[in-house]
Amino acid sequence: MGGPVGDPTPVWAVVALPLVLAALTYSAAAMDSAFHSGGGFVAPLREGVRLVVQQRRRTLAPDALLARIGVISLPAAALLAATVIPLDGGSVWEPPVSVVWFNAMEVVAWGSLWLAGWGVNSAFPLIGGYRFVAQGLAYELPHMFALITAGLGAGSLDLTEVAAAQDGLWFAVWMPVAFAVYLLSAVAMTFWGPMSHPVADDAAGGVAAELSGPDRLLFFAGRLALLTVAAAAAVPLFLGGGAGPWLPGWAWSLIKTYAVLALLVWVRGGFPVLRMDRFMTAAWMVLIPATLLQALVVGIVVVN
Amino acid sequence: MQTVAFWVLAVGAVGFGVAVFVVDSMARATFALLASFLCVGVELLLLDLDYLGVLVILMMIMEMLVMAVFMIMYMMNPGGLMPMTMVHNKRGALAISGSVFAALAAGVFLTPWPERRGSVPADPTFSVGESIMGPKMLVMMVIGIAILATMVASVVLATDRGRYDRPPGRADGAK
């Protein structure tokens, strides 16, 4: 999230990135609190402070190293994914395949959840970890196809170029299936709302059941940060990036990011948690063929 | 800077590779292997092979997670709670791996390496694909789809009913 294309990344952008991500993540937590629990905008802060000072609860014979890696890698992956997301024409790091990098960092969450679930040596977290591996496998393919469709429409795997290719017509308008599948699978990849089976109540909190204190704070902050990054990536991928009248590019990027984020946060309240073993069929039988057809349509349009 | 990064990652890749055989827990061995592959992926990024590097990182994370599920299913000591070793037939294995390493290392020094001709292409990944596949690209892509279709079809034919599918005639009822 730095200067225009071509310039070397300024130092302030590298410093600002974690701060911007943290602010957006906190907004997500505040929106969640305002929409669903009625706790107001200070509630996440209060909960965060409570978790920071809370003493850690220990389990018998944990693999503490693996559990720690699992918990810490979740916010770390969100930050690494955020480095390639353009805010105003350019991003902090500009690899020519930033779409693939973004996806790779989302997939880190598989490892995070499995490690956190395995490491604490407790049955319910382990079940949650395995649930997420299955969920990730089922949703990675439709997610990947939705990302590739946007890349195909732009002829590039660079988020900045994908945003620039939507001159006049947003990809969300002429590839609605890919956009819908992207949002749905992004919710699944961040185990949020209806896709929160890996941390669901029926398994006593799943992966997070034994996490307490700072671990729990990092884990759930990491999840919200991943959700935030997924919302921010939807802007260059499908919503025209920073394009818009009157306001500068970064302002439009932020406004659009907030809109997508509010939608994703709001989704949590309205739908029950889906049992992944049942919903797996829908992922394989409906979403993958739908995204493939969408890619075919986009491919034909691009070739012509 | 790049040289330092190269050496740190190279030592890291080998170190994590050694760790795979030292740790006594299958979970740790799997993720040590993943860490080793991630080091290799970043090495590829250093070589400006962006697509290959990022792809190695993406695929290896997915692959190691799937591998973790299967290895833990099959290994006698998944959690490191009982004595376990990843090494068998130590002397034979040492002799074989030592001589293979010596042969490969000798090859590095004995091969007359060609000088670089021309300059680095704009898109190295594309050029590697072109020079490996050449005019047979179309055939390879068709074969790739055929292999995928065969795998899906054989799984569909082999599984009459999955563990979580409901029995026929009870599509709406309880499992």
Image (spheres, coloured by chain):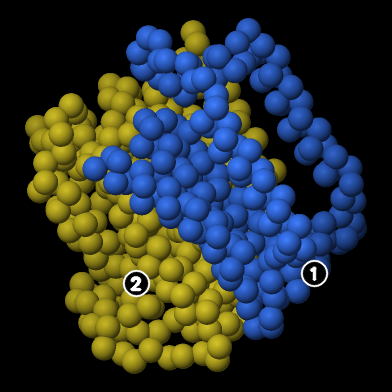
Chain colours: A yellow, B blue
In three-dimensional space, the C-alpha distance between marks 1 and 2, rounded to whole angstroms, equals: 39 Å
Foreground residue, A241 or A2? A2
Residue located beneath label 2 in the image: A218
Residue B147 picture location, percent across and down: 76, 30
Relative to A177, residue A200 above or below: below
Relative to A274, residue A168 above or below: above
Residue A56 picture location, percent across and down: 38, 89
Dot 1 falls on a residue whose secondary structure is: loop
Q: Judge left or right: residue A291 versus residue A84.
A: right
Q: Judge left or right: residue A191 versus residue B21.
A: left
The subunit letter for the residue under badge 1 reads: B
Q: Is residue A214 visible?
A: yes
Foreground residue, A304 or A49? A49
Foreground residue, A86 or A69? A69
Write down the quadrant of residue A213 in the picture.
bottom left
Instruction: Give the residue at x 67% y 46%.
Output: B99
Relative to B48, residue A49 above or below: below
Q: Judge left or right: residue B139 versus residue B38.
A: right
Instruction: Give the residue at x 28% y 21%.
Output: A167
Residue A270 picture location, percent across and down: 46, 64
Dot 2 falls on a residue whose secondary structure is: helix
Amino acid type indicated by mark 1: Ala
The numbered disc on residue B174 is 1
Amino acid type indicated by mark 2: Leu
Instruction: Give the residue at x 49% y 8%.
Output: A304
Instruction: Give the residue at x 38% y 56%.
Output: A77
Q: Is residue A135 visible?
A: no
Relative to A20, residue A38 above or below: below
The local crowd at label 1, few if under 14, some if 14 to 19, many if 20 or more residues have their Cα within 10 Å, is few
The subunit letter for the residue under badge 2 reads: A
Viewer-nearest of discs 1 and 2: 2
The local crowd at label 2, few if under 14, some if 14 to 19, many if 20 or more residues have their Cα within 10 Å, is many
